[in-house]
């Protein structure tokens, strides 16, 4: 089975996710700068989520670039990843409108955690399909960055009840960690 | 006529459908877990509909993979299927916000029923175009799973006025039944 | 310049237009059939607009299938067509929510009229680029169906102030007229 | 790395942006022409933004047509451009609903300015990747039109506090300036 439609469908879903998030920034009624003030946390949340969804699109792009064909389990692992990504606009809106209150911040982390786990599952399905000896398999290997992200998300979710700003700082840190596309896959492609 | 744009357009419409459903989960105003409680039925409805739309995308993908070209009636049969799928966000929202009341549950089933029928019509148009002796024709054959789904939907719609939880259970059962992509087409593709 | 991205972008825009129209059907609060009653004109409007957008996608598909490359004016003629199509969700919602009042019905016709004119302009740009002797040029020829539609829209807009049901009937008639994909182009493709 | 998915994703995001802008035109409750009157500035804002997003899609199309492969920095420069474009529906709505008040007009210009800068950054990334001696590099050259646009945006933002109609006039002027697709790249493609 060719990967073309899987890529096209994922591009479509991620394009809609990244764009409807901006709908959570409701147009304010006033016209003075003060009218924009309550939107600042909403905007900060939007930027963070935009970067995260951008990272997922980027890495999804890289990972599928290194593969050739797909099968049934891969289709579902991909839909599973898109499911968690589709919840990002909801938790972004909840977190932003409530000025980073504890529980919304924790739930935001939980959605990031589930997205990371489902991305990991998708990568395992792809490697299983391609063979561990394949370019993708040997490149991703133990997936250190994926594992450390999961640990940081769990810590951040727990810490969000102690100090939500630390939790938020950790979310930004993981985003930075992933900002650079996966060198392992990138390196693999250069021979 | 090539099938490329039919696939691309269907991917686009299904991607938008699957993503705008999440807009029905309105961001709550409170920040405590209790604020999320009324969203639980909305979330459960979202998960069910997400799985259904995912199944349709998956099967659509498989079915069109087994075909080569399309014609006018196929374009319209496809638009007809997308029409019923486009109503899923509406009935999902109505069912979820009303905590699975009888009539919304029945209407949800009616949209699933019409989607199944229009999918069946599309498959017949494709087989007619490809020839009953074609790979697709011999693979789909009598389409047992499609017919049993229609029967279950009709039973569920009627039962939703007796006990809506049974109806809902039946919707989940059909989703499970289809979760595995169509073995018949899959088998056919193996040489 | 290849036509691939023009097709992909148009598919994306039309997919979003056809899907966000359904957002105008606001989920009702009650759960009895009476709660759905006010939605009937909204639903009828949705069906009519869905068929129209489907026709435009279908004909756009056929017309671009018969062409090979595109140029700057074609890109803008296409964006111009998409502009008028993008107004269809707005006029659909206005007409449906106001139970087919005179002015919304007339404005709906005006958007259909502008869509038809911009489609005609696009077809002329394509023929000019391809050459009047080309397959597309000789196939479309005088474009009788396009011209008669424009006349009917103008008549319907004027009649909507006399009897809006006649206007609505005319809109449905033109949809029927176009329902069959363009035989001229279809015939042309047969050797 | 092939440019196919970058184009498909950008097409998807721009298609959603251009279409959700129309959602800011809320369906009015009345049915007389007076009910449409408050929508006139919203409509004018929509037209202006539609033309701008259309110009960006057109130029993006041209620029990527002249390139062959992409790399990591190009992916992020492209996401950066899409980020600013994704804010256009928000500022369009704010400006339109407030009948072109000073601060919304200035903020609208700021988003246009950032879009122009991020487009410029993307073009530099593409030229750096392709080589200054490449077709793209020699064609874009000093990018006079890009630089003059940035200057006009800055002037317009400052003037919006003096006379917002002049600012708005300047936004329309830049749109006109870019309306014609980039002759330099177009010319380059001619042998």
Image (cartoon, coloured by chain):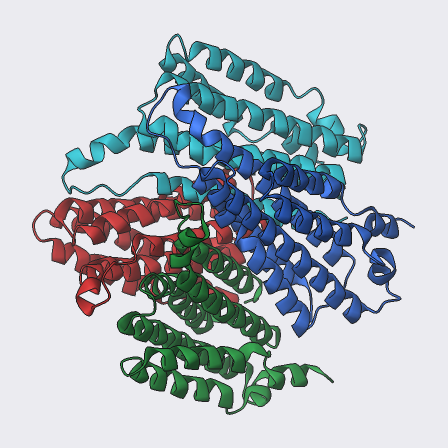
Chain colours: A blue, B green, C red, D cyan
Which image quarter holds the N terminus of chain B?
bottom right
Q: Is residue D186 above or below residue C95?
A: above
Can residue D75 be seen in this snapshot? no
Q: Is residue D64 above or below residue B68?
A: above
In the orientation shown, which residue stands out farthest toward the left? C162
Which quadrant holds residue B42?
Answer: bottom left
In the orientation shown, which residue stands out farthest toward the right? A191
Which quadrant holds residue D26?
Answer: top left
Q: Residue at x 85, y 59 (%)?
A: A141
The x and y percentages for residue B113 are: 38, 78
Identify which residue, A23 or B173, lies in the foreground: B173
Q: Is residue D135 left or right of residue B45?
A: right
Which image quarter holds the C terminus of chain B?
bottom right
The x and y percentages for residue B108 are: 35, 71
Identify which residue, C130 or D102, lies in the foreground: D102
The x and y percentages for residue D18 are: 46, 41
The x and y percentages for residue C30 are: 22, 62
Q: Residue at x 68, y 28 (%)?
A: D121
């Amino acid at each position: 089975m060719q990967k073309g439609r899987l890529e096209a469908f994922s591009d479509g879903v991620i394009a809609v996710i990244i764009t409807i998030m901006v709908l959570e920034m409701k147009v304010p009624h006033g016209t003075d700068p003060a009218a924009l003030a309550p939107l600042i946390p909403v905007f900060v949340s939007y930027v963070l989520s935009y970067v995260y969804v951008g990272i997922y699109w980027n890495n999804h792009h890289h990972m599928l670039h290194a593969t050739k064909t797909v099968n049934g389990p891969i289709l579902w692992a991909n839909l599973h990843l898109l499911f968690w990504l589709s919840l990002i606009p909801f938790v972004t809106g909840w977190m932003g409108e409530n000025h980073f209150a504890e529980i919304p911040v924790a739930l935001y982390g939980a959605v990031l955690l589930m997205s990371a786990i489902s991305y990991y599952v998708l990568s395992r399905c792809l490697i299983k399909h391609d063979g561990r000896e394949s370019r993708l398999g040997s490149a991703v290997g133990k997936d250190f960055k994926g594992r450390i992200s999961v640990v940081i998300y769990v810590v951040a979710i727990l810490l969000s009840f102690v100090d939500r700003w630390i939790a938020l700082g950790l979310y930004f840190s993981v985003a930075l960690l992933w900002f650079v596309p996966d060198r392992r896959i990138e390196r693999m492609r250069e021979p």
